[in-house]
Amino acid sequence: MNILIIGGAGYIGSHQVKMMLDYHNNVIVLDNLNTGYQEMVDHKAKFIKGDIRDYDLVCSILKNENIDVVMHFAALSLVGVSMSQPSEYYDNNVVGMLNLLNCMKDCNVNKIVFSSTAAVYGEQTKMPIDEDALTNPTNPYGETKLAMEKMIKWFDEAYGIKYVTLRYFNVAGASFDSTLGELHNPETHLIPIILQVALNQREYLGVFGDDYDTNDGTCIRDYIHVEDLCMAHKLAVDYLFETNKSNYFNLGYGHGFSVMEMIEAARKVTSHAIPLKIEARRAGDPALLIASNDKAKKVLHWNPQYDDIELIINSAYQFYLKR
Ligand code: UFG
């Protein structure tokens, strides 16, 4: 199969590239390298530097490479930054998606797996969150992803482009050979920041609020290992070819850990004291985000393997140690 992976030089995309190669696919990567790293792209994939908003380039790849399915990971994804720079988020994410779908329509490529997010749900009272929950994003990042989801739906109605949308909860960890992992600049995610403290690159972890309505007052998230997440994408491709139907799924393990529990787990993994300071709440953080994964298990036959928080943290730790 010929697969175009857009954003294949990023954290999740680079893991996906490796997995799809391992399943004997022909993989073409398109990435503008604004946030990705070319060194993370497996050399067996064909790498093309360019932007999802470039109509001529995307069309030429779809046609010349005879693409069967597109996997789309190329989005700006920092909630906090999206609050201050919504224009960039709409441009990269929504305009990018419009261009991609137009190219697919014009070049007769009619299958796509799309990376969406738990941020489309916003604040929810019922946990775990299932796919029928009403969407109500609380930040521009979530709004752009929801707009992209809706756009694909209408392109399916009108032009028959079939999609699987995957709504990620908190993706974490690194490849078990420690070659691929999470590198953001600036880093804002909890596990990489905790590990920077463990590696003495930061003095302490700032805990964003300890007065939430949770057991210990800190926010609870559903952390999912990146390899389990990528396996769900591989199954999504299989689903598209087997059924030719569109669908959407949550991806998480169905239970969560508080910030304090994450620190405690990281202390065990690293044997570092990991000092912390309680700071103000971060704007836009829901107290609790936990996925219901029943639908992905039932329909995609997804069977996650790495639901172990210390294993997840350790895989990330080994990646940073190696770098
Ligand atoms: N946190 C801290 N200190 C830090 C960093 C994070 O206390 O230095 C806390 C956050 O407040 C939050 C938890 O750790 O409660 C996890 O924060 P992350 O930034 O690691 O992840 P988010 O839950 O904010 O974001 C993730 C994805 C987004 C997605 C979002 C859905 O990274 O792409 O979930 O709400 F949109």
Image: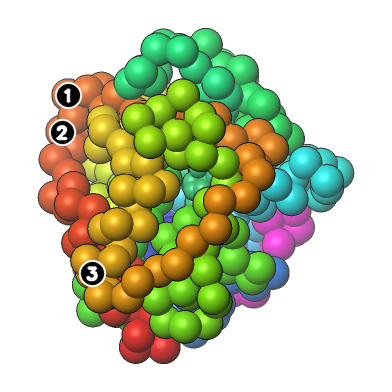
Q: Which mark is residue 139?
A: none
Q: Nearer the viewer, residue 258 or 27?
A: 258
Quarter that holds the N terminus: bottom left
The residue carrying mark 1 is 298
- 238 over 226 or under it: above or below: above
From the viewer's side, name the closer residue of 277 and 84.
277
Indicate the secondary structure of the residue bearing disc 1.
helix
In percent of the image, x 61 and y 18: which residue is there?
Answer: 136
Q: Position of residue 232 (x, y in %)?
A: 28, 43
Q: Residue at x 41, y 47 (%)?
A: 259
The nearer-to-camera label among 3 and 2 is 3
Left or right, residue 74 beside residue 223: right
Q: Residue 24's x, y, as percent?
A: 23, 66
Q: Is residue 307 visible?
A: yes
Which residue in the protein does label 3 denote?
Answer: 269
Picture quarter containing residue 155?
A: top right
Amino acid carrying label 1: it is: Lys
Q: Quadrant of the C terminus?
A: bottom left
Q: Amino acid at mark 2?
A: His
Task: Tell me what residue is drawn at x 52 percent, y 11 percent.
Answer: 134
